[in-house]
Image (spheres, helix red, strand yellow):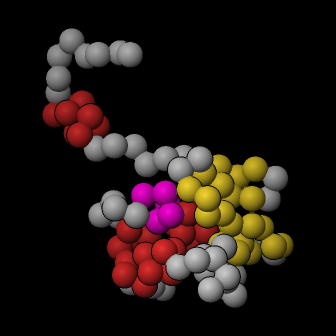
């Protein structure tokens, strides 16, 4: 662990704000160790997220949906949901529903 000898405002800010877990693309699947939700590449720059069935998303939209799944308590959820054309309440509601419901 690297503990700073002096604490600047930026170092305090980074320490106080936890990092959002990584979202990785592995073999056409967008996954994260922090959630069981995933997105799958379906061709022509389109992705499908398991908790948003029937919606074809861009890679950036799929990443936003995955960020919602890995960090639903973050204030950025509103911005990520807006990228999907949803409110934060709608996105969180879809994510909380059992997949396939």
The answer to whether residue 89 is above or below residue 28 is: below
Tell me what residue is drawn at x 50 percent, y 64 percent: 69
Image location of residue 77, percent across then percent down = 38, 68
Tell me what residue is drawn at x 21 percent, y 12 percent: 5
55 or 99: nearer the eye? Answer: 99
Q: How many marks?
A: 0
Image location of residue 81, percent across then percent down = 44, 76
83 or 15: nearer the eye? Answer: 15
Decide if residue 75 is in sight here. Answer: yes
Image location of residue 34, percent across then percent down = 53, 50
8 or 48: nearer the eye? Answer: 48
The image quarter containing residue 72 is: bottom left
Q: Which residues are drawn in magenta?
A: 67-71
Q: Specify the principal SS of the magenta part.
A: helix
The image quarter containing residue 63 is: bottom right
Q: Is residue 12 left or right of residue 66?
A: left
Image location of residue 52, percent across then percent down = 61, 80
Tell me what residue is drawn at x 69 percent, y 87 percent: 54
The answer to whether residue 101 is above or below residue 36 is: below
Residue 68 in magenta? yes
53 or 15: nearer the eye? Answer: 53
Tell me what residue is drawn at x 81 percent, y 73 percent: 42
The answer to whether residue 39 is above or below residue 51 is: above
Residue 23 in magenta? no
Q: Is residue 12 left or right of residue 99?
A: left
Where the N terminus falls, by quadrant? top left
Where the C terminus falls, by quadrant? bottom right
Decide if residue 10 is in sight here. Answer: no
The image quarter containing residue 44 is: bottom right
């Amino acid at each position: 662990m690297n503990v700073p000898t002096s604490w600047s405002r930026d170092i305090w800010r980074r320490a106080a704000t936890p990092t959002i877990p990584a979202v990785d693309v592995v073999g056409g699947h967008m996954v994260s160790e922090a959630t069981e939700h995933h997105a799958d590449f379906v061709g022509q720059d389109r992705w499908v997220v398991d908790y948003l069935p029937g919606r074809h998303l861009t890679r950036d939209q799929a990443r936003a949906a995955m960020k919602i799944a890995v960090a639903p308590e973050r204030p950025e959820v509103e911005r990520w949901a807006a990228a999907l054309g949803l409110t934060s309440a709608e996105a969180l509601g879809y994510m909380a529903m059992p997949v396939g419901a």
